[in-house]
Amino acid sequence: MEKSLKLFGTAAFMLSVTFADAAPIWVVQTANNLRRAARVAIAAKTGAQSAVVLGKCSNALPDDEIARLADIASRKGGVQEVGKILGKMELPLKYGEKTGHLILQDTYLRIAVQNGHLSKEVAANALKHLQGTPGLTSLLRKINSVSPSQVKGHLRELEIALNARQRGFQTVSLGQKFADGVKGSDTDLDVLLCRNGKNFAIESKAYSGMIPDAMARADAQSLAAFCKKIKNTVPVFCFENVPSKFTQAYLKRHNIQFIHGTPQELAVKLDIIASIN
């Protein structure tokens, strides 16, 4: 194990967290997520990671049940109903946290394919490469929303993670909750990546038009707050289109990297950011 760490780059797995007298629970969770990402990277490097095929994982739900759940999910309020049905199955309790969540992830991905929210190829890659990632189950549930804008926004987060992986990034977490000290309640970080000893905190906006300045500023403040607690972390704001001059100036003033484009283009730009930070 020690040798594997050195080969991959020990620095990639060293988390530098700013602890007060007692670290907030979300800071501890982030540390645990980073350690998990390190173990996953080692498993992938040594070939110890198990391959999982969509619809073929142990105790996966049968196709006719997926079709039934997909029909329910396609209606208003249906995703919540599906969540209740799956909750009553108590899959993590019955099969253990890891296997139970894998079944849930497989289920939500197949529902999304059935309802046309995801291609089978993207779904298969998500299960193969992101299985077990903290927050993935919740993100996949949201991708099954009946709201086109919600589907688009959450799908973009998934695609950023998948495309970044092709550039050598590890996905640490998706939609991680944290207290930014700015908003009245917990907010969430869309995507947390790591590569070669650096963490990259991603805020993603999938607006077809220009994002409102006030919204961008509020999310930028949250992003900066996260990076103050989790050291060695680069804040990156991802847009679909170029933000306003005001937002650009605000982000530059607060040392927040900002990029725009498709998920594929964003991954290329993240690669460049990682090489110069």
Image (cartoon, helix red, strand yellow):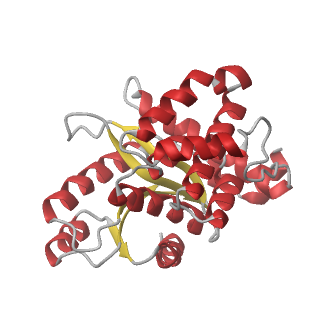
Task: For the N terminus, give its image quadrant.
Answer: top right
Nearer to me, 72 or 248: 72
Q: Is residue 153 above or below residue 243?
A: above
Find residue 32 and report its horizontal and vertical position in percent: 57, 36
Q: Residue at x 41, y 45 (%)?
A: 75
Q: Residue 158: where, in percent of width, then height?
A: 52, 58
Give me the residue at 43% from left, 40% from top.
Answer: 78
- Can residue 231 be seen here? no
Nearer to the camera, 106 or 139: 106
Residue 85: x percent and y percent?
54, 28
Front position in the image: 41 or 98:
98
| Left or right: 117, with 124 as reference point | left
In the rendered view, would you say 131 is above or below 251?
above
In the displayed structure, would residue 7 be above or below residue 144? below
| Picture quadrant where residue 152 is located | bottom left
Q: Position of residue 173 (x, y in %)?
A: 52, 47
Image point (37%, 39%), residue name: 77
Residue 83 in view here? yes
Which residue occupies 34% across, 66% down? Answer: 206
Q: How many marks?
A: 0
Task: Answer with left or right where residue 174 lies relative to residue 48.
Answer: left
Judge from the rendering whether residue 164 lies leftward or rightward of residue 61; answer left or right. left
